[in-house]
Image (cartoon, coloured by chain):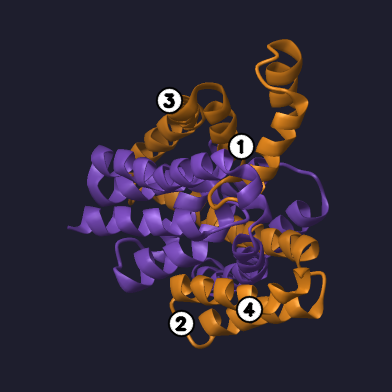
Chain colours: A orange, B purple
Amino acid sequence: MLTFFEKELVEKHKWITHEEFIESVALGQMTPGPPIINTGICIGYKLKKIKGALVTTAGQTFTGTVLAVLLAIFYVKTKGNILIGSIMKGIGAAVVGLLLSIVYKMAKNTIQDYKAAIFALTAFFALGVLKLNPIGLILASGLAGFIVYRKKKE
Amino acid sequence: MILLKFCLILFVVNSLTIGGGFMMLPVLHKEFVEKYHWITNQEFLDAIAIGQITPGPLTVMNAVIGYKISGLIGAVLAMVSSYLPCIIIVTLACRYYFRYKESAIVNSSFQGIKPAVIGLLAAVAIPLGSTSIVDLITFSIAVISFVVIAFTRTDPTFVIVGAGIIGALFL
């Protein structure tokens, strides 16, 4: 997906430079929300300011949203259908496997030292066992990250 | 009132979660399923599946949940409140790129949030797993999906479609 972007935007249309492209990709990774969308927003903003940011968001999300809504309509309408129920049962189990594989992949990339492992394990127990509020936990982990990692850089 | 709360939750989630669409799941599950009971565990899983097989980021699952809660308006508002924080934060970050990139506050807090959300995602797999894994067949589907997606480069869409077919035949 990113290589396609790079070809179209940088090589073919020359709308942005290679450096600007790399910068946008990096920015997509380090801002909250879906990285690809954020990279797009950043490129849109570089081209046409706020208007560009809005248009790229709409453009990138339109097809997926329309399809998802169509599927949602179908899903709500067929509620109670036995066949659809069986299909969704199979899919539900696969989604759990999918979630665990995301956890595995992300952990392999992100958890490189014991500090990161402690962050992950603490969050796991705080939500899984203590049932604390995840929004609070994310804020707390941000604060803890600030305290733990801030000094290292100086 | 429900819609307002719904939009507010999506706005907050998308302002906070770093590391990709899946990282919003723990918060969404807590708020939508456990706290407000707007949807069930099964419906939550179904929304994830629809979000995954449609093009674009997983965030479109919010449109599915929005549609379930209050029809087309819910779906549209879900998308607006999911992407609004992205537009605001990214345009600001883009404008002040170097200051943002070098910001000690942003970097160090994200360094804490990134591993933490992985732990949260692992924790949310427990209630979802106990809803969907009920017998040997569903257990096998979950294990096979995990292995295939974690260790091969197979697109998860194929795994989900395959699991649906197995479900139609055996469940």
- Badge 3 sits on which subunit? A
**Alpha-carbon span between mark 2 and mark 3:** 40 Å
- Give the labeled residue for mark 1: A39
Measured as percent of width and height from the top left, residue B130 is found at 53, 74
Q: Amino acid at mark 1?
A: Thr
Residue appearing at x 54%, y 53% in the figure: A32
Measured as percent of width and height from the top left, residue A92 is found at 53, 57
Q: Residues within 10 Å of mark 4 (few under 14, many from 20)?
A: some
Q: Residues within 10 Å of mark 3 (few under 14, many from 20)?
A: few
- Badge 1 sits on which subunit? A
Q: Nearer the viewer, mark 1 or mark 4?
A: 4
First in residue order: circle 3 vs circle 4: 3
Measured as percent of width and height from the top left, residue A118 is found at 71, 82
Q: Nearer the viewer, mark 2 or mark 4?
A: 4
**Alpha-carbon span between mark 1 and mark 4:** 29 Å
First in residue order: circle 2 vs circle 4: 2
First in residue order: circle 2 vs circle 3: 3
User: Do marks 3 and 4 both belong to one polypeptide chain?
Assistant: yes
Q: Residue B15 vs residue A11: left or right?
A: left
Q: Residue B112 vs residue A41: left or right?
A: right
Residue appearing at x 43%, y 62% in the figure: B28
- Give the labeled residue for mark 3: A51
Quarter occupied by the N terminus of chain B: bottom left
Q: Amino acid at mark 2?
A: Leu
**Alpha-carbon span between mark 3 and mark 4:** 38 Å
- Give the labeled residue for mark 4: A147
Q: Badges 1 and 4: C-beta atoms under 8 Å apart?
A: no
